[in-house]
Amino acid sequence: MAVVMTDVPGAHSSSPSTTATVAGWREWVRLPELGVEHVKAKLDTGARTSALHAFDLEEFERDGVDWVRFSVHPWQRSAEDEVPVECPVHDRRSVRSSTGHLQERIVILTEVELVGRTVRTEVTLTRRDEMGFRMLIGREALRQGFLVDSGRSYLGGRPPRKVRRRNRGR
């Protein structure tokens, strides 16, 4: 679904109108470069950078470049279907969590498929065991042509029932 915005204050466009993809406040996303086919994400306009639940982080060097090895549990309330990942470190940042604590995080650059569109964005790696969603999509990703409808969910569709049941730990 796309919306044409005309003369919208703050719209990032070099022309008077911009086409944006409407997304709900929560969506199923894919992380194709990381091998994660389904993860439920909260679209968080209050967060600058996106964040992904990652654990067992191990930094190493490959051909003079800093890399990180980590694992992802894509399902909420479940440790099944662990996805091992290796990718270059893009940056390191101090990030203030929702609880107000400052935390140093590794930042990776990866593709996120959201509502049928793929964007490249920065993602911080952090433990999100106790959080309701294994991933947050922040403003840096959303400003690449998305509008968030806070009253709707899953505008990009849902994965098959079997996948959704696994997400609920069944």
Image (tube, grey):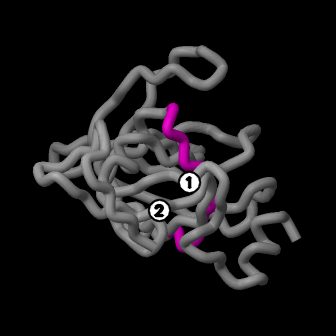
> Measured along the vertical axis of the image, is residue 6 above or below residue 117?
above
Residue underneath mark 2: 22
Instruction: Check contact, mark 1 vs mark 2: CB within 8 A.
Output: yes
Mark toward the start of the polypeptide (1 vs 2): 2
Taking the image as shown, residue 52 lies to the left or right of residue 91, namely right
Query: Are there few (<14), some (14-19), or many (20+) residues within 10 Å of tag 1?
Result: some
> Measured along the vertical axis of the image, is residue 73 above or below residue 140?
below
What amino acid does circle 2 point to?
Val
Q: Main secondary structure of the magenta part?
A: strand
> Measured along the vertical axis of the image, is residue 33 above or below residue 58?
below
Tell me the residue at 44%/53% (across/down). 147
> What element does badge 2 sit on?
strand
The residue sitting at the front extreme is 7
Picture coordinates of residue 159, whole percent (x, y):
65, 79
Res. 58 visible in picture: no
Taking the image as shown, residue 32 lies to the left or right of residue 154, namely left
Q: CA distance from mark 1 to mark 2?
A: 7 Å
Query: Are there few (<14), some (14-19), or many (20+) residues within 10 Å of tag 2?
Result: some
Taking the image as shown, residue 70 lies to the left or right of residue 5, namely right
In this view, the residue in front, 74 or 8, is 8
Q: Which mark is residue 91?
A: none
Instruction: Kindly indicate the quadrant of the structure image that contains residue 20.
Output: bottom left
Tell me the residue at 51%/32% (across/down). 46
Range shown magenta: 36-46
Residue underneath mark 1: 149
> Measured along the vertical axis of the image, is residue 82 above or below residue 99?
below
Picture coordinates of residue 92, whole percent (x, y):
34, 29
